[in-house]
Amino acid sequence: MSKPQHHEIVVIGAGICGATIANELLCRGKSVCIVDAAHSPATACSSHAYAIAHPHIGRGSPRLLRLTRIAFLLAEARWGKLWDQHGIFQPTKKDRVFDWAEMSNYLQSLDLDESIAKPLDAQEAEKMCGIKQSGVWLPRGASLNLSDASHILLQDHERLTCLWNTKISKLEETNGKWHLLGNSNEAILSADKVVVANAMDSKALLSTIGIRLPLKPVRGQLSIFSIKKDDPWVEKLPRVGISGDGYCLPAQLLEDGSYRWSVGSSFDEGEDDLGPRDGSDAFNREQAQGLVNFFEGDTKSLEKAGDFVGVRCVAGDRLPIIGALTQRPGIFLATALGSRGVLWSALAAKLITAQVLDDDFALLARFGFAADLLAALAPARFFAGALAAPAALASNSKPIFPSGPKAK
Ligand SMILES: Cc1cc2nc3c(=O)[nH]c(=O)nc-3n(C[C@H](O)[C@H](O)[C@H](O)COP(=O)(O)OP(=O)(O)OC[C@H]3O[C@@H](n4cnc5c(N)ncnc54)[C@H](O)[C@@H]3O)c2cc1C
């Protein structure tokens, strides 16, 4: 049997997360091997073609708000032509009173100027976005086809090796070198540094090196509706994205005068079934009524034309897990992107690359990464004794759940 290939850096998982990290490493002049159990990139959750992106402006921990702002700016700068900037409107929650000055001060406190987030009263919102509700207009809000993006990132490159149809089932370390093993314990690859970016499966994989990650699956279904040209819904369909209780993309006019409209998504905690469900479409029809404030609209007019079903990987505190696994030198984690694959993959690419290449902290600080933000993302936050000396971490990999407020 031939000796398994050795690479300096191997990335496990070729969804949007692994693909973005691999591409960033290539851009920094490194050689990378990416390995995926499937036959091509983005076959799992990143087969999603309609993922939206905007900085989080609602309730949430101050760290989440700061992180989504940084991640949004990184994502916006990264995607070029694929970045579909249609703008996103976030209506005021039904139980809240809209106060323009208060909202404006709040947005400034988040360091979001008017080019990123602008409060609108109902009249302005109707003029600008075609929606008669007060809220916040995010003109740079966009959507991204995660599948197209992943494929482009992994195009042929002389320093990129792609291994498809190759599932990594186990990790083992000897003398500072990591061995990546298959189902029958056969050696597939070895590496100095391994980036684990295989979403929910990172839980099983890391358990092989004694690390228990607090991850859970959350099934989601997005519905694509068709609306006939003379239907009363047509008047209500948005020409921008909306993000509130659920989200939708701008409706698209087709040649025959009908409209196509993507509305999502269900959030089925603890479930990982990929089969489409009528119940999830019914839920999305109700979300559609709420998003455009058209509760009298007949949901039967939203005829199903397609769907996307995926399983999000979510951590106990709902923040992504991004960073070096200090207990196991040479292993880096980028998982638990939850419902923010666009933002967190852009952030993971910068952060993981900086850590893999041992960049100076000043380089990271340039992107706005303060030490407390790095700690909020780091795998170490889940392990007892996380604040103790590194030596103490090595022996203790029992996960703990931080008690801070949940991110959405
Ligand atoms: C309904 C729904 C709506 C969403 N909407 C949005 C949105 O609007 N905006 C947004 O930003 N995000 C959204 N998301 C989230 C986004 O889709 C995910 O965060 C993102 O796709 C996760 O990417 P990933 O690369 O981490 O995981 P995945 O895309 O799941 O990739 C993991 C890869 O690892 C591979 N793999 C697994 N195990 C192994 C192994 N042992 N060995 C080798 N390879 C392995 C798999 O084959 C797969 O290719 C949504 C998700 C859902 C379900």
Image: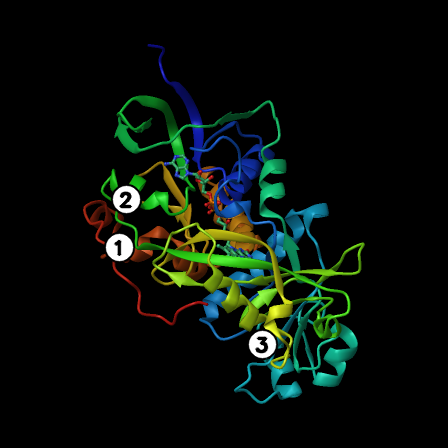
CB atoms of marks 1 and 2 within 8 Å: yes
Give residue 22's position: percent from left, percent from top.
52, 36
Q: How many marks?
A: 3
Decide which of tag 1 and tag 2 comes sooner along the chain.
2
Q: Residue at x 30, y 51 (%)?
A: 213
The part of the image, by quadrant, that contains residue 149 is: top right
User: Which residue matches tag 3?
Assistant: 290
Amino acid type assigned to the residue bearing label 1 in the image: Phe
Secondary structure, mark 1, is loop
Q: Secondary structure at mark 3?
A: helix
Nearest to N terminus: mark 3 or mark 1: 3
Q: Amino acid at mark 2?
A: Gln
Instruction: Answer yes or no: is residue 49 visible.
Output: yes
Circles 2 and 3: CB atoms closer than 8 Å: no
Q: Is mark 2 within 8 Å of ligand 1?
A: no
Q: Residue at x 44, y 71 (%)?
A: 61
Q: Mark 3 or mark 2, which is nearer the start of the sequence?
A: 3
User: Where residue 34 sits: x, y (%)?
Assistant: 48, 31
Q: Quadrant of residue 116?
A: bottom right
Q: Which residue is mark 2?
A: 327
Q: CA distance from mark 2 to mark 3?
A: 46 Å
Q: Nearer the viewer, residue 252 or 244?
A: 252
Task: Identify whether 40 is placed above or below 47.
Answer: above
Q: Are marks 3 and 1 in contact (CB under 8 Å)?
A: no
Nearer the camera: disc 3 or disc 1: 3
Q: Which amino acid lies under the numbered mark 3 shown in the image of this protein? A: Gly
Q: CA distance from mark 1 to mark 2?
A: 10 Å
Q: Is residue 228 left or right of residue 269?
A: right
> 157 or 63, which is in the foreground?
157
